[in-house]
Image: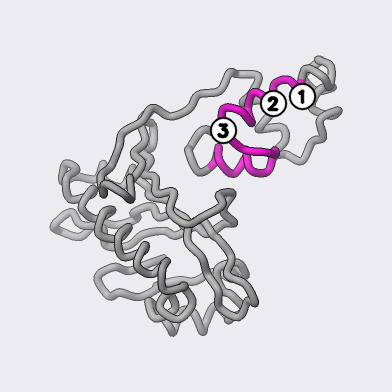
Amino acid sequence: VIDYEEMKFEYVSNNPLFLCGFSAEEVLEMGYEFYFKNVPTEDLQLLNTINNAGFDFYDKLPNNDERKLYSISYDFHLKGKYDKPILINHKLTPLFLNQQGAVWKSLCLVSISHNKKAGNIIINKQGSDTLWKFDLSDKVWIAKNKLKLKDKELEILRLYAQGLTINQIAEKMFVSPDTIKYYRRKIFEAFEVKNFTEALSFAKDNKII
């Protein structure tokens, strides 16, 4: 949990991916210094751009609790005590607004990124069919329609998320494994990914499932 007014972490979980070899207590004590110490220089510049663009986006929204329905996600590298920087996905969802309607505290979720490079800045609104992608070249937000899957494709993704194999999914859906493979290929093409793990990560990041 991030406190923007105090510029500190209010709570840090024991997520080894985010901790980078440090303890939760050490990261909590470092606060925002954690980023300066563990993010490569080029990605620090990116985070500054994202921070400015994100707050600018929120400032233009109606000043009410609906602001808490918007979440922002993006990818950047963390190095910490690792030999090689790891590309992670950072997703922030407002928990509390201050009296002026600005974001006060946010919930931060960290996971491995399915992308190949930093950036990929997206704002989602809960219950909306629209998402906003930030163009780093032109420094503008571009509204796009969220990708939609067919019911069978959604069911396949959900069953995969439960740990089922292709044969088990086929048995559960009363179709052949080849049919599952056909829908799998369609999902990969729609998401521009290469495997089920990337597809599931993409679907979660983009609020498709």
Instruction: Please indicate whether residue 116 sits to the left or right of residue 184 in the image.
Output: left
- Earlier along the polypeptide chain: callout 2 or callout 3? 2
**Crowd around label 2: few <14 · some 14–19 · many ≥20 (10 Å):** some
The residue under label 3 is which amino acid type? Answer: Phe
The alpha-carbon separation of the residues under discs 2 and 3 comes to: 10 Å
The residue tagged with tag 3: helix, strand or loop? helix
Kindly check if marks 2 and 1 are in contact, taking CB atoms under 8 A apart as contact: yes
The residue under label 1 is which amino acid type? Answer: Lys
The alpha-carbon separation of the residues under discs 2 and 1 comes to: 6 Å
The residue under label 2 is which amino acid type? Answer: Arg
Instruction: Please indicate whether residue 98 sits to the left or right of residue 10 in the image.
Output: left
Residue 160 place in picture, x, y as percent: 72, 35
Determine which residue is flagged by label 1. Answer: 181
Tell me the chief SS of the magenta region.
helix
Foreground pick, 147 / 192: 192
Residue at far left of view: 100
Determine which residue is flagged by label 3. Answer: 191
Query: Which range of residues does the magenta coloring cover?
Result: 180-204
Residue 15 place in picture, x, y as percent: 59, 67
Which quadrant of the view contains residue 42? bottom left
The alpha-carbon separation of the residues under discs 1 and 3 comes to: 15 Å
The residue tagged with tag 2: helix, strand or loop? helix
Q: Quadrant of the C terminus?
A: top right
